[in-house]
Amino acid sequence: MRVAVVGVQGDVEEHVSITEKSLKSLGIDGEVLTVRKPGIVSKSDAVIIPGGESTTISKLIWKDGVAKEIIEIAESGCPVMGTCAGLIVISKYGDDQVRKTGTKLLELLDVRIKRNAFGRQRESFEATLNIEGIGEYDAIFIRAPVIEEAGNGVKVLAEFDGKIVAVREKNILGLSFHPELTGDVRIHQYFLTMV
């Protein structure tokens, strides 16, 4: 199995490391590659778009041709996971901030997103979530977005404080938080079993 981690900006190494641990824990032979240029995503079995700064990630993946490959692989049924800023990038609809910054979305996940919904960096926090299919999970939120609306085909996996923070639509997994910053491999395992 080949997993591509979009490596233009954000928590790239952390996702690579926890995905490698998850593959090993599941007994799956595979490789995890950092992607900055086209040509690798199209030959991968799954793609992860990490947290970071959504406007920057969006600009770079569209400029370099990686965005087109992510859309194609998602449409073919391969799993795509977006965490924090990655969730913003994979969403169909953005908020005023998304429009003001001209952030071009991949439109893979039928949700409306709100950037920085819990505040700035200093308002970062940890919270225990009950995630469907995973159970209790200690999640790390950093300048996290929330899902304000989810389409009919979108399954809500977790909420925090009445706000949607984890969803799945077919082969697309979207998380407001940073699973790569915990030692808990269960979300990455869940994602890998979607392949």
Image (tube, grey):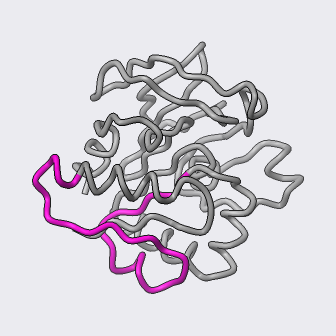
Task: Judge whether 43 appears above or below 181 on screen.
Answer: below
Task: Judge whether 3 appears above or below 90 on screen.
Answer: below
Is residue 49 shown in magenta?
yes
Q: Total label count?
A: 0
Residue found at the very far right of the displayed protein: 100
Write the start and end of the magenta stretch as one range: 23-50
Residue 176 sits in which quadrant? top right
Relative to residue 137, is residue 65 drawn left or right? right
Residue found at the very far top of the displayed protein: 161
Is residue 8 shown in magenta?
no
Residue 45 sits in which quadrant? bottom left
Residue 61 sits in which quadrant? bottom right
Relative to residue 36, is residue 145 drawn left or right? right
Relative to residue 194, is residue 148 drawn left or right? right
Name the foreground residue: 13 vs 135. Answer: 13
Q: Which residue corresponds to the image point at 14% horizontal and 65% vertical from the top-left?
A: 29
> What quarter of the picture does the C terminus occupy?
bottom left
Relative to residue 74, is residue 89 drawn left or right? right
Task: Judge whether 26 appears above or below 28 on screen.
Answer: above
Locate residue 53, reporting x and y percent. Answer: 70, 53
Locate residue 169, reporting x and y percent. Answer: 42, 44
Locate residue 170, reporting x and y percent. Answer: 36, 48
Task: Judge whether 176 appears above or below 47 on screen.
Answer: above
> What quarter of the picture does the N terminus occupy?
bottom left
Q: Which residue corresponds to the image point at 45% horizontal and 70% vertical from the top-left?
A: 34
